[in-house]
């Protein structure tokens, strides 16, 4: 004889009473602290415990830098024509289509006109989640147009980098973008229009070796990976583990490659201060 | 961009991974030469293996496809799967059908007997006086710079030098420049600018240098500065890609009024080995990667990224270095003569426009 008797034959499994916690909490990769997502958002996606700067997308970046989240985008309608018809295990055109569907962008950068503490600026923000923020013909052209627009209207320029480098699937076409952008920056330099480069996690390869390192000021967020050759390539070459912090912002600051490492919440005031100095 | 497989090291990607190259120790280099000879004699077994694998995968997919297509009542999912499988078949077939003409060219561009920068300098110029050092950190033997006379005219010559024998190769760091190399190059270009002498640069470089020191001393900044300042250098610049044109390392001395490329040279954003290691996850797929990247002189010409292809002697520059040097000198001379007739402001405007309009492969969406 059974000791217990089930009261009703049916269990209520409709899930109505379930407490939903999924998506409300995130774990910091750095300090392993569990953070309430709302806290993280309020803190500009920076861990409140350890100051780890989480990656943010281009739109969030524009919202943080420009006054009242008010800005006007331009040159957002350029699309790559896949000049090499590149196919590896998957075709480049399908990779592009997927990235476009996921991000709602045509390529890995957004140009915007807006105000930064009341001062008109042009901001080019790169989108890392679009094929690693890689630079092909479209990214090269969009950034060049931002530079030219800044020169034409004598408006200070801010470029926020987040990129793995040149886009392999556009081969040498990608490489030529480095020359094009750098030449445009030479003209901007001669026109004495301020250009602030902001390097965020990660900025490597051809992007570092062109516009990211050519700012009147090169600023970086704390802990960002910044370099030319990737750390894994170097590790394979020298066959030893790289020291802790190699190719991070603080390392570059120490070696004289950056003007300042600025935390996310101080970034806007820092740029505003610099523009006070540079622009009339 | 970086390579994820450590296989790249031990097998075919002796050379470049990421944006740059894996420097080899002398012993490894010798080993690789022996390996290459062996492979040449016995047929490349590695390649045959990968062909066989591809063949087997194709057969498997064909089976799967047959099963899927035979299923009654196909829904969205299965149709999607079938579509994917067809795409994969397409990709695999293109790998099987790859012609090797491109790869032969790359082997010529990297040929151990191919004339190097110093050899060309010796054959083409007179009164060569080398200039050393970047006035900041040191002298980079991988980048050679100097004053020279070219058919009676004073010119500044610079270029990357790989070195010939093992000792030389180690001394020249296999032709992989360090930041001080790029800075030295820019320094001598500014000397040329000050005294209104044209600049000639010769490019034969596997890529930038993946090393701790190069990163510490800011090779990205050094390359970027060269790109910017060459675009506004107030003297004519002619560049010739003579062998390998490896990504940023090459471009850092190739922002020129005229970019010439020898018939069997290559110019790429990444080495085929590294590209294969990243995109195919298998560095032995380098031939497919080479094909996909379009890195030969005729490809570059078609894309409008170079101005002229310089013919080479039959069989490649190494078969007759004197003739190759003569053809190179002829082309350099012709272009230099043309450039000297153009007033500097127009020259700079034309240089800007050339790079501004180059590589525009996009369309405007409505």
Image: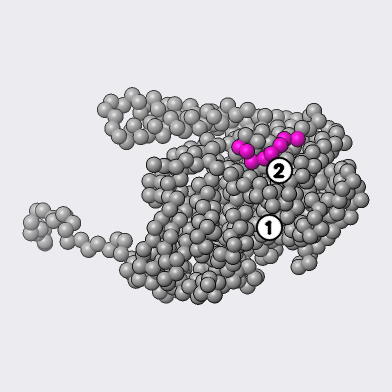
Answer whether labels 2 and 1 touch (C-beta < 8 Å): no
On residue A146, the disc is: none
Region rendered in magenta = B303-310
Circle 1 crowding by C-alpha within 10 Å: few under 14, some 14–19, many from 20:
some
Relative height, residue B308 to residue A116 (above, below): above
> Is residue B26 or residue B125 the one in the foreground?
B125
Residue beneath the point at 83% across and 60% down: B132
- Provide the chain ID for the residue under circle 2: B
Residue B228: image location, x then y, percent: 65, 57
Q: Is residue A257 left or right of residue B72?
A: right
Residue B264, can we see it?
no
Place residue B137 in its image quadrant: bottom right
**Residue at disc 1, secondary structure:** helix
Residue B97: image location, x then y, percent: 58, 26
Residue B302: image location, x then y, percent: 62, 34
> Which color scheme did the rendering employ for the protein?
one colour
Q: Which residue is mark 2?
A: B259
Q: Which residue is mark 1?
A: B229
Residue B38: image location, x then y, percent: 75, 35
Residue beneath the point at 67% across and 40% down: B306
Q: Is residue B307 magenta?
A: yes
Relative height, residue A193 to residue A237 (above, below): below
Whether discs 2 and 1 lie on one chain: the answer is yes
Residue beneath the point at 33% across and 24% down: B70
**Residue at disc 2, secondary structure:** strand
Relative height, residue A41 to residue B104 (above, below): below
Q: Is residue A239 magenta?
A: no
Q: Could you tell me which quadrant the N terminus of chain A lies in?
A: bottom left
Residue B359, can we see it?
yes
> Is residue B124 or residue B348 the one in the foreground?
B348
Circle 2 crowding by C-alpha within 10 Å: few under 14, some 14–19, many from 20:
many
């Amino acid at each position: 004889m059974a000791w217990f008797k089930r009261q009703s034959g049916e269990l209520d499994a409709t899930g109505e009473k379930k407490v939903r916690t999924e998506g409300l909490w995130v774990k910091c990769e750095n300090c392993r602290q569990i953070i309430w997502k709302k806290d993280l958002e309020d803190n500009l996606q920076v861990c409140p415990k350890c100051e780890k700067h989480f990656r943010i997308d281009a739109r969030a970046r524009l919202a943080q830098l420009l006054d009242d989240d008010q800005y006007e985008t331009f040159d957002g309608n350029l699309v790559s024509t896949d000049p090499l018809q590149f196919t590896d295990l998957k075709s480049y055109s399908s990779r592009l289509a997927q990235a476009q569907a996921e991000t709602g962008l045509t390529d890995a950068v957004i140009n915007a006109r807006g105000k930064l503490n009341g001062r008109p600026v042009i901001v080019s923000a790169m989108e890392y989640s679009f094929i690693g923020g890689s630079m092909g013909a479209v990214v090269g052209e969009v950034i060049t147009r931002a530079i030219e627009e800044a020169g034409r209207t004598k408006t200070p320029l801010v470029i926020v980098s987040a990129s793995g480098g040149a886009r392999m699937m556009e081969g040498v076409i990608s490489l030529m973008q480095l020359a094009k952008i750098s030449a445009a920056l030479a003209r901007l330099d001669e026109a004495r229009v301020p250009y602030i480069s902001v390097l965020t996690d990660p900025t490597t390869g051809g992007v570092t070796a062109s516009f990211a390192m050519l700012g009147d000021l090169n600023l970086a967020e704390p802990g960002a990976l910044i370099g030319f050759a990737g750390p894994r390539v170097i590790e394979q070459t020298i066959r030893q583990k790289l020291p802790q912090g190699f190719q991070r912002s603080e390392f570059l600051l120490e070696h004289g490659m950056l003007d300042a490492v600025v935390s996310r919440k101080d970034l806007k005031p820092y740029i505003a201060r610099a523009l006070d100095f540079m622009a009339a | 961009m970086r390579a994820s497989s450590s296989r790249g090291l031990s097998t075919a990607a002796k050379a470049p991974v990421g944006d740059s190259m894996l420097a080899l120790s002398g012993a490894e280099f010798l080993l690789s030469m022996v390996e290459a000879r062996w492979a040449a004699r016995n047929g490349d077994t590695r390649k045959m293996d990968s062909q066989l694998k591809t063949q087997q995968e194709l057969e498997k997919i064909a089976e799967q496809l047959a099963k899927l297509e035979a299923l009654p009542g196909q829904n969205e999912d299965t149709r999607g799967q079938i579509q994917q499988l067809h795409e994969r078949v397409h990709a695999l077939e293109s790998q099987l059908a790859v012609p090797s003409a491109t790869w032969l060219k790359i082997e010529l561009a990297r040929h151990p007997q191919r004339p190097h920068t110093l050899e060309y300098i010796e054959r083409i110029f007179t009164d060569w006086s080398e200039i050393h050092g970047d006035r900041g950190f040191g002298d980079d033997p991988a980048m050679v710079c100097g004053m020279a006379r070219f058919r009676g005219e004073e010119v500044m010559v610079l270029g990357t030098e790989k070195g010939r024998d093992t000792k030389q190769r180690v001394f020249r760091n296999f032709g992989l420049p360090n930041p001080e190399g790029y800075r030295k190059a820019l320094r001598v270009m500014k000397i040329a600018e000050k005294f209104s002498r044209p600049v000639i640069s010769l490019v034969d470089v596997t890529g930038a240098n993946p090393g701790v020191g190069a990163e510490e001393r800011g090779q990205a900044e050094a390359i970027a500065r060269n790109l910017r300042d060459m675009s506004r250098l107030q003297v004519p610049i002619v560049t010739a890609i003579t062998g390998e044109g490896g990504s940023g390392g090459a471009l850092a001395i190739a922002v020129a009024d005229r970019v010439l490329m020898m018939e069997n040279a290559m110019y790429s954003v990444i080495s085929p080995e590294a590209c294969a290691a990243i995109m195919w996850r298998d560095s032995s797929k380098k031939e497919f990667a080479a094909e996909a990247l379009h890195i030969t002189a005729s490809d570059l010409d078609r894309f409008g990224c170079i101005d002229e292809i310089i013919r080479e002697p039959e069989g490649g520059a190494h078969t007759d270095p004197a003739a190759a040097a003569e053809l190179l000198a002829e082309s350099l001379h012709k272009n230099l003569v043309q450039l000297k007739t153009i007033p500097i402001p127009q020259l700079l405007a034309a240089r800007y426009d050339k790079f501004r309009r180059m590589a525009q492969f996009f369309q405007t969406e409505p």
